[in-house]
Amino acid sequence: TSVEKWIKYFRNNMKWSLYQNGNGYVDELLYFVDQISKINSRGIKQKRVAAITDGAIYNIKAEKNGDLEIKRRIPLEAIDMVTKSSVSGLFILHVPNEYDYTFEAAVEKRDLLILILQKLSPSIRVQVSQESDIQKYALKKENSVDRKSDAGESIPALSRSLNLKKSKEHGAYANALVTLLNREERICKDLFNIFEGVLYGLHPRKSPASQLNLDSWKRAFGALEGVGFLHSRYVCPDIQDSLTGGGDAWKVLIQRAPVLTKVYESFIEEWPVCMRELKNLMKKTFVQKYINRKKTRFPLLNLESLMLRPLEHCSRYEIELKALVISNQVTLQEKNTARAALEVVAELAARCNQILKREYGQRRQQRK
C-alpha cells in the first residue's frame, strides 16, 4: 500500500532520521505516512505528507529532490478533537493550545488516519459534520484568541444583527435557537461597546494617555477580552450562519467545543486574579475619575458586574439545554443534539455556577 511504501521511505530518509535524532524523538515509532492535502487559511490546497508516530503527527513538505521539510509537529496529547465531513474528505485537527489544521484526503485514507490517531491517543474525540465545507470551524493561526490585545487588535464588532423573534408557530426547539442567537448577539454588542467605549481607553498601547501599565490591564481585563473575541469572531457569526442557512445552531457549540472550553477555562481560572486586580485599579484616583466620566455615556456601568457576564452566559447554556432534553415538545433528534451540546458545556457551567453562587451570596450579605 502507499502507506507502507511511505513508511519504508521515511525509515531510510536521512533528513527524517536527523530531525528525529536531533530533537530527541529517535524512539518514536511510525504508524502512518501518506500524502494528503493541507488547506491553508486562504482556502488553497497544498500537497503535504502526514506522518503519525506514537508521539505526534507531523505536517511535512516533501520536495522533488527527496528533501523533507518538517513544517509542524503536533504532540498527540495536544489534539483535543477531530472534525470530519460526512460528505467530503475534509477533516480538522483541533489543537486548543495552538491553532487548528484543515486537511483533505480520500475518505478511506482519512478515516484510517483518524482511526490510528484514536488508537494511539484514546482521548481524541471525533465528531462528524453533515456539511461538505467545514473549514470555517477551524481556528486559524492568525486568529488565535489567546491575547489579541498584545498585537494591538481589538474585539471586532458584529457585521450584522439578525434580531430574530420567537413565534408559537416555530415550536420549542426553534424558539430556543432564537433565544440562543439573541443572547449571543447581546453579549457581543455589550462587550464590544464596553471595551471600545471604556476599557481600551485604559489600555496603554491603545490609549497613550492611560496611566496603567500593560501587565495590570491584562491581569484585570485580558481574560474577559478573550471571551469577547470568542463570541464576536467565532460563536455568534457561526450561529448566525447556521440559522440563516437552515442549520442547527446548537451544533455550533459542539463544533466549537475545543476553543470554547479553552477560553472559558482560562477565564474561570483567571477570574480571582482579574477581580483582585480590578478592585485594586478601582482604588486609583485617576481610574475612578475616568470611570465616572464614562458613566455619562454608560450610566449603568459596573465593571465588577461586567466580570460576571460570561459566567452567567455560560450558565444559561446549561439551563436552556436541560430544558430541551426533558421537553415533550421536541423530537428525538433534537433531544440528542441538545444532549450532545449539554455535554460540552455542563462542566464549564458547573464551575461558573460555583463562582456565581459565592458572589451572589457575598452581595446579599453586604446588602443586609
Image (cartoon, grey):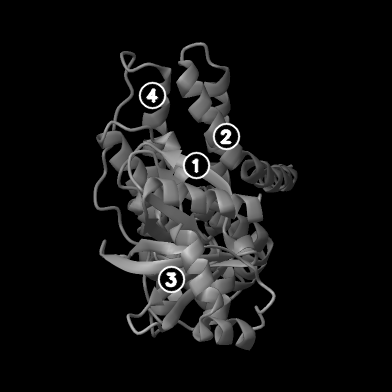
The span from disc 1 to disc 4 (Cα, nearest Å) is 25 Å
The span from disc 2 to disc 1 (Cα, nearest Å) is 15 Å
In the rendered view, would you say 202 is above or below 129? below
Q: Is residue 230 left or right of residue 218?
A: left
- Given this view, does label 1 or label 3 mark the residue nearer the observer? 1
> Which label's residue is closer to the chain start, 3 or 4?
3
In the image, what residue type sits under mark 4?
Asn
Q: Which residue is mark 3?
A: 148
- Given this view, does label 2 or label 1 mark the residue nearer the observer? 1
Q: Position of residue 72 (x, y in %)?
A: 48, 74
The span from disc 3 to disc 2 (Cα, nearest Å) is 29 Å
In the image, what residue type sits under mark 1?
Gln
Secondary structure state at the residue bearing disc 2: helix
Residue 304 visible, this angle: no
Q: Which residue is mark 1?
A: 127
**Residue 342 marker:** 2
Q: Which residue is mark 4?
A: 175
Q: Residue at x 48, y 60 (%)?
A: 3
